Amino acid sequence: MLQRIDLRGVQTTRSELASRLPRAALNVEKAMDIIAPLLEDVRTRGAAALRDIAEQFDKVRPEHLRVPAAELKKAAEGLSPELREALEISIAHNRAGHTAQLPEDRITEVMPGGFVRQRWIPVERVGLYVPGGLAVYPSSVIMNAVAAQVAGVAQIALASPPQAAFGGLPHPTILAACYLLGIDEVFAVGGAQAIGMFAYGAAGEPALDPQVLCEPVDVVTGPGNIFVAAAKRSVRGVVGIDAEAGTTEIAIVADDSANPEYVAADLLSQAEHDPAAASVLITDSEDLADRVDAALTVRAAATKHSERVHTALTGPQSGVVLVDDLDAAIAVANAYAAEHLEIQTANAHEDAQRIRNAGAIFVGPYNPVPLGDYMAGSNHVLPTGGTATFASGLNVHAFIKSVQEIEYSHDALVRMYGPLRALAVDEDLPAHAEAVKARLDS
């Protein structure tokens, strides 16, 4: 079922290795050209543009772009006890996991009388995007919102696509998750237009909305399709963004000790997200690859979204990479830089320590990616497309700024004047030294 890339006996450089690995082809630049007029329309016409665009792409014209508070409460009251409990557990676990990420303010006495304080300050306002598409993602509400709340963000707005099946509102479970998290600024706006609304703000439409529908935000986070990624790239600099999170991907490093049914189930779990989802097995065991392929064939035929899964698993973005040994498997995994990386080897904990590039690492046979998607306490908004070589998953740092405070006494400033003046003169910036000297002369 999966294509095979045989790298056994092949010596490659890092760049050559990366070029031979399966990867979805995404043209974000082309998508940016497509959405540019849409973003400008939102910037200039606000709510009117948002309704026109929703009618075109979502096949519904929302009466309420901002979801009424009563609808949030109604959605929460409609939750089954089992689903409500699951959401509450996920929220609690994510609060614990994200609280551990909070940095501490520190004061450093650089010299007698000279202090630098390291402060971490949350941004004031954020816009969180939760996709609709082929599935419903209340878990993405939790991942985005909990990280922002733990960071101390004062104002949180959230957008999710309007659904014709629900009268132009987002899916009820999305709304229920917002209610449980105490988020009441929720918008029935999807796609690139939601990113534009957050970046530029949006004026209301007379007779339907307040004068200002949505104020601009400082940071936009959340996953989405290629057009959402393109919109985030387009507005970066107007606002901060977390990353251009694209279609999901999983890589599994496995040796002959791995259970082929576990490996197959995990590869399939991500393939059901999207026909363009990537599922990659990296192994030094051809026998394991054969057994995984056989298990996948059976599981793919039996699963609910079999057509979508089959397309994803047989696409060019998915495959088995055969390598000589575990060292080579680790090298391939670091070159691939998967969004989700599972380590299913005999010494999984030790092998995981050798991974440099991954969005999140799932260690051992009892840690499938869906655990991180929902309940582990980690974040599931992760870097895709190889960007894990330099980017992190969503965390509290996306919502806070590092600010340094400098406080030197008069005596400390006196002691620094000579060396400071030497540097200022060398850089031909004598007024820099004069700013210090003015204080010494007074």
Image (cartoon, grey):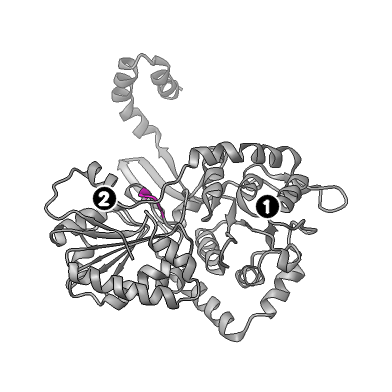
Q: Mark 1 or mark 2, which is nearer to you? A: 1
Depicted 414 relative to depicted 401: above or below: above
Asked whether 363 falls inside the magenta stretch, the response is no
Q: Where is mark 2, residue-wise?
A: 335
Left of 264 or right of it: where is 379? Answer: right
Asked whether residue 379 is in view, the answer is: no
From this view, report whether residue 184 is shown above or below residue 336: below
Say if the magenta span includes residue 384. yes
Closest to the observer, 224 or 195: 224
Q: Is residue 350 left or right of residue 174?
A: left
Front residue of 296 and 350: 296
**Residue at x 43% of width, y 42% of height:** 404
**Which disc, if any, is residue 57?**
1
x and y, in percent, of residue 203 in the image: 76, 44
Tell me the quadrant of the picture where the N terminus can be found.
Answer: bottom left
Segment colored magenta: 383-387
**How many marks do you count on the picture?**
2
Name the residue at the left extreme.
9
Callout 1 crowding tier (Cα within 10 Å): few <14, some 14–19, many ≥20: few
- In the rendering, at what x and y percent does residue 99 appear? 44, 65
Left or right, 442 with reference to 170 = left
Residue 342 x/y as whole percent:
30, 66
Kind of residue at disc 2: Ala
Q: Residue at x 17, y 67 (%)?
A: 285
